[in-house]
Every structure is written in C-alpha cells, then in structure tokens.
Image: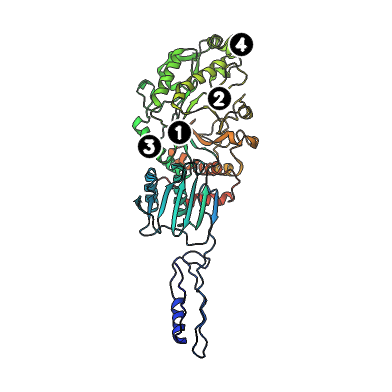
Amino acid sequence: MMMRQFRKHRRSRLIATATAAAALTLALPGCSSGAGPDDPRSPAAPGSTPPGPPQAAPTPAPTPSPTYPLSTAPDTVPAVHEFTPARGPGWRPSDGARVVVDAKSPGLTDEGRLLAGEIGLAYGGTAAPRRGDVRLALGAPGSGTPESYTLTVRDGQATVTGPDEAGVFYGTRTIKQAVRADGSLGEGTVRDRPAKPQRGLNLDIARKHFTPDWIEDRLREMGDLKLNQLGLHFSDDQAFRIESTSHPEIVSTPHLTKAEVRRIVALAKSLHIDVVPEIDSPGHLGAVLKAHPQLRLTDVNGRAVPGAVDISNPAAAKLVDELLREYQPLFPAKAWHLGADEYQALTRSNPEASFPQLARAARQRYGAGARVQDLATGWLNDRAAVIRPSGKQLKAWNDGFFAGGIARPAADIQAEYWTGKELGARPPLPYLAEGRKVLNLNDEYLYYVLGEPNEFTYPTGRRIYEQWTPLVLRGTTPVPARYQEQILGARLAVWADLARSQTQAQVADGIRLPLAALSQKVWDERTPKPTWNEFTALVDRVGRTAP
C-alpha cells in the first residue's frame, strides 16, 4: 500500500495537527516490525507548525514506509538450490486467490488444477493474473536447464516459470510444501534445479505383490520430493506380476492388470515420473520357466540351474523378445531395464566345462577363443536391439557387464551399479573409465531388502543424509569427482527377498525417511545445512503426501 504524503497548506496549526493525527491511524495490512507480515509497525509522528505570524507551513516529513524483515528461503524437501531474499509482504493463500495459467502455456492446466486443489485455491484457467494469485507459465525454449524453475514472489503474487512442464511442476511442489510448513512464501526469488537427471525409487513387485493404490501413494510421495523415476521389477523366480496376452500361462496370482498399470502410468506421467519396467533375463526367470521347463539351463550333469534360461536355445530368446515387444506400448516412458544380473552359469568356477552347450554356442558366434561370458553379452545386446528402435534409454545391472571378453556390451546401455557384496564383482571405476553412464543403487546405502537376508540391513535416512553422495557407488568410498557428470543419479531400491517379513504399510513407513534423504542428495549435492534432526522435523512439517 502506498503511504499518503501531507500536502502543503496554509491552514491553522489545529487543522495541520488533526491532519497528521489522522494519517497516523491509517491501517497498513501486511506491514511488519520484523516479527512477520501480520505485525504492522506504527509510523513516527510528523512535526507540527510552530506558532507565529501566518506563513507557508513547512512540508512535514513523509510518513515512513513500512519495513519488513528480510525474507528466508521456503522450507522444502529437498531444499531449494538458490534463494534471493527481499523485503515485502510475501504471499499466502487468501480468499478469492486463484491459480492461473499463462494463455501461451495451456499444457500446464493439470499442474494448475492440482496445485489449486492442494492449497485450497480456485483454479482460474487462463484468466489474467491479479494480486493474490499464483501464476504458472512456460519460459522460452532454452531459458533454463531441464526440470529447472524460477519462483518469484512480488507485489502480492507468486509466479512460477520454467523451460519445461516438469520444472513448473517442481515449482508448484515448492509452493505446496512451503504452505504446509509455514503457511506462506517469503518475498524474493527461488532459482532451483536438480543436480541429477535420474532420481527415484525401484520397487520389486515380483516377489511381493503391491496393490495399485499403494503404488499410487508412493508416486504422489515421490512427486512432492521431486523424484522422477519409478523402476518396476515385475518378473523374477517367484512370480510374474503383470497381465500378459502373449503368454498368459506365465502370469502369477495376484498380479496387476494392464488396466491397473495404465492407471499407474497415467498418474506417474501427471507427476512427471517415468515408470521404467524391468523384465530381467537371462537369469531371474523362474516364474516363466515354470510354464516352459524345456527352456531351463542344465549343466553337464543334467541338473537345472534355478531361474536361468539356456541362452544357446533360440526358443528362449524368442519367448523373452515376445514379452519385450508386448509390454513396450504399456510403458511409454523413455527408459527400459534389461536386467542381465546374476546369470548363474557364470558363477561356476569353469563355466565352459559346466555348460558345454553354452561354450559351443559362444565359439560358433564369436570364434575359437570365445567364452560363456561372450554369449551372455551377446544375449544382452540382442535384447537391447529389440528395445532400441523405440528410442528408450537402455539399462542393465552392472554385473551383466563383463571385462576382457570378445563381445562388448553396447555403449548406449547404462550401468545400474548396485553390488558391493557379490563375489568377483567389478568395482565402479572400470565402468566409468571406459566412458559408460552409471546410475547409483549402492547396496550399502540404498537397498531396502525385506527380512534383511545375506547381511543386508535396512537403510536409514540418516546414513544417506550424512554419509552418502551420488559419487559413493560402492561401499562407503566415493569415486573421483571428475566422474560426476557420468553418474546420472540414484534410486532407492526395495527388494522383497523375504516378502512376508513386512506389510505394505511397514514398507511405506520404512522407506519414508530414506526416500526423503535421497531426494535431498540427488537434488543438491552440496552438504546440507540443516542437521539430521532439523531435517526430519522438516519432513514431518511438510507432511505425508499420501492419504
């Protein structure tokens, strides 16, 4: 509000004094003495005209403008990357306020409607913004890095802009959390961006059935934490958990129907989360092999190897490729996980002697010096070739990449690094040194394995928050910082090895703080300023996002 100034006049001392007194009583909503926008500060009294002969009265000093404390950054998880404070009334939800979308950015309608419902405002569509509103708009192409945004609070209005819809969405998450935490946003400008492009949760729905509602609750939680990737491991030795039309005989009960998956994927898309499917092969296929025992891998003594298909049998490749093609339309996200871990043939001391049919097939394809590992690499590359025309990013577990072979894994397959406990596992530096892109799923910090078998312990948010960074790919030792750009991000992984050891509710509660801590460390790699206790208090203040 603009302060009134006294006009020059030649009236009597009584009239001048009365006018000054009236000015002192003007209410200035939102003014502050430093305690907050609802604590107005009284202006100082102006002087009065001294007695004497009639003359031009001096101009009284202007009533001082209200002062505000310098604002502070909004309280959010993850914390915003940069905040420029200012002095002013800030912004808070108020009667008649709306969320409006720039007329040139109609694609932000969903983001606008969602935010309006979450903070109790009306949705105003593409109406012209007014004081009290939140305005969402896309910036010019190239106006920022992907998923970045700017949030400006000025003149009683909050404006979110970003180069893409994901960035604007994350700006609305900042508003939502700030309103939950403090009821308002301080005057000033937030400039925010993620440190890593891939940030999320990996969920084993093969060994434990998770209901669609539970998965959707996790997606909403992830959206508020600015996480953007949900990995779905839905095929393993114990079960195959998504409806299939090409091979209905392999599907377990219970399972997700395709209609339920489409609903999950649609919600994820609205929250700017990619759902990345994984059909693991050539190992972890026990559920498929129950219906197709003729495709099992057997050793030289005729014993079947649990979960492993015979990769020298063309029928095995045909079945897996049919599944890959069937599920591609169901998962339109831009990434696909090929699995490739723990192929049990390669755990034998002499795979060529144990599996002569694999050794023979390897030599036929790659020459006299080829080994079983070359045939396994060829399997991975062949499955990648099935998915590659879709344009999706290709992923595989790091123990599916082998050193020293004749066959080399395709260069465009990202290595998802997890293992620190597997015998003979390669350390992360060779992957990075050859230029491969890597995602961090360090099993020391980021593996939530139900029942805690094989020396696993449930990860704690505190360890992630205080000790881990994306550079810590294996164990507790970081790789050199020069590889920072090759490490694409991280996911917390839930594995249901002992599925009945926890209920769905216990899993949700158990991963809540680890997921929040992970979100902080992949959004901003700098050491967080709040202590762990302060951080957990903030997580509670911004509230659980799932019903």
Residue linked to disc 3: 266
Distance (Cα) linking label 4 and label 1: 46 Å
**Crowding at label 1, few (<14), some or many (≥20) Cα neighbours within 10 Å?**
few
Distance (Cα) linking label 1 and label 3: 29 Å
Q: Image check: 503 left or right of 71? A: left
Q: Image check: 186 left or right of 327? A: right
The amino acid sitting under disc 4 is Gly
Circle nearer the N terminus (4, 3): 3
Q: Is residue 72 above or below residue 505?
A: below
Q: Is residue 348 visible?
A: yes
In percent of the image, x 51 and y 53: which residue is there? 189
User: Is disc 4 in contact with disc 3, using a CB cutoff of under 8 Å?
Assistant: no
**Crowding at label 4, few (<14), some or many (≥20) Cα neighbours within 10 Å?**
few
The amino acid sitting under disc 2 is Ala
Q: Please tell me in which quadrant of the rendered image residue 461 appears.
A: top right
The amino acid sitting under disc 3 is Ala
Q: Position of residue 313 (x, y in %)?
A: 47, 12
Circle nearer the N terminus (2, 3): 3
Name the secondary structure under disc 3. Answer: helix
Distance (Cα) linking label 2 and label 3: 31 Å
* Closer to the eye: label 4 or 1: 4
Circle nearer the N terminus (2, 4): 4
